[in-house]
Amino acid sequence: MTAESTPLTLAQLAELAGVSTATVSKVVNGRAEVSPETRAAVEALIRRHGYRRQRRRPAPAAVVEVVFHALEGDYPVEIIKGVEEVAREHRLTVAVSELHRSDPAEQDWLEGVLRRPTGVGVIAVFSSLDETQRERLARREIPLVLLDPADDPGRGIPSVSAGNWNGGLAATRHLLELGHRRIGVITGPGYALSGRARLDGYRTALDMAGVPADPDLVACGSFLIEGGLAAAQRLLRLPDPPTAIFATNDGQAIGVYHAAHRLGLRIPDDLSVVGFDDLPSVRWALPPLTTIRQPLTAMAEAATTMLLALAHGEPLPQSRIELATELVVRESTAAPRR
């Protein structure tokens, strides 16, 4: 095939004719606002060389990607409900992916995000970003919002979280007001920003009440039922065990229930328990769990709204949103036995 018989693109035809690509486009599409001389020149070039219509690049899929470190229990369900609520309103599709690892601080979860078409953008749940990841994300201009971030998101990274410190304060105050003074706490994993804030709220409540903080009453957990069970067994086997336990998420609180059952303790007669999250299942625990309500669905709605604003190039009124938590009193807490 000769060079002259090779079909040309709009840009190549425009260069040969000495006109703009817009003018060539008007000729190709039969529009009238072109002079007869220019039209004739462009049509002659098309007859001589041919015209190769360029295939348009497909527009990014209207997809919001939600990345979880693990899909277990009610926690991700409540978040997906919130994302879907906003996505449905804007006729968007929600894609969910799981990282299959327990420690978001140790995984380069961004690799998968960078390999896939991102559509609208990404909501990363209980994840964190290091400096290298921030730079890579900025280079690709991928809209991203951290939801319930595992660590401090850093400057310029939009995030949505709950009032974790206030929640820890409220949970511990509730137990103090019932008369408890030996109050155990089961923390989250060390990397979890939310768990550290809840522990700080617990310590502040004790300090404000003039109750000395006993390091023996602080047990490390994992935000999993198994971690709550192991930690509660250690606390309840102390020579001077707690009369109440604040578990810093609902999963660990269920683990406390199992530990109490194994040791022959009744809730709340022998042990009061407070959780954190207010997942739908805990109201059906026996007895129903007193807990701190974390507005997961509302947090997800806020994160999706922020993501859409970023995708449209709109400035965010604030890069960090913190939604209030609330104490929900049920039947797992009571005054200690005298």
Image (cartoon, rainbow, N blue to C red):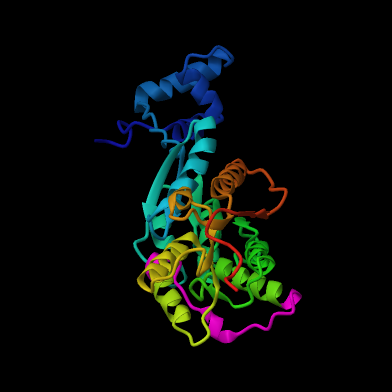
Q: Going by the image, does 335 lie left or right of 85?
A: right
Magenta region includes residue 118: no
State the image coordinates of residue 285 (x, y, percent, origin top left).
43, 54
In the figure, residue 245 lies in which quadrant?
A: bottom right
Q: Going by the image, does 182 lie left or right of 224?
A: right
Q: Is residue 15 above or below residue 223?
A: above
Q: Quadrant of the N terminus?
A: top left
* Residue at the image point whose x is 47% and y is 71% from the top: 105
Q: Nearer the viewer, residue 13 or 53?
A: 53
In the figure, residue 164 lies in which quadrant?
A: bottom right
Residue 18 visible to an observer of this rendering: no
State the image coordinates of residue 232 (x, y, percent, origin top left).
45, 74
Q: Nearer the viewer, residue 28 or 46?
A: 28
In the figure, residue 35 lies in which quadrant?
A: top right
* Residue at the image point whose x is 64% and y is 82% from the top: 213
Q: Is residue 224 above or below residue 140?
A: below
State the image coordinates of residue 209 (x, y, percent, origin top left).
74, 75
Residue range in magenta is: 207-226
State the image coordinates of residue 7 (x, y, percent, origin top left).
34, 31
Q: Nearer the viewer, residue 54 or 326?
A: 326
Q: Quadrant of the C terminus?
A: bottom right
What is the tally of numbered marks visible in this picture? Answer: 0
Q: Going by the image, does 137 lie left or right of 4?
A: right
Q: Is residue 2 above or below residue 331?
A: above
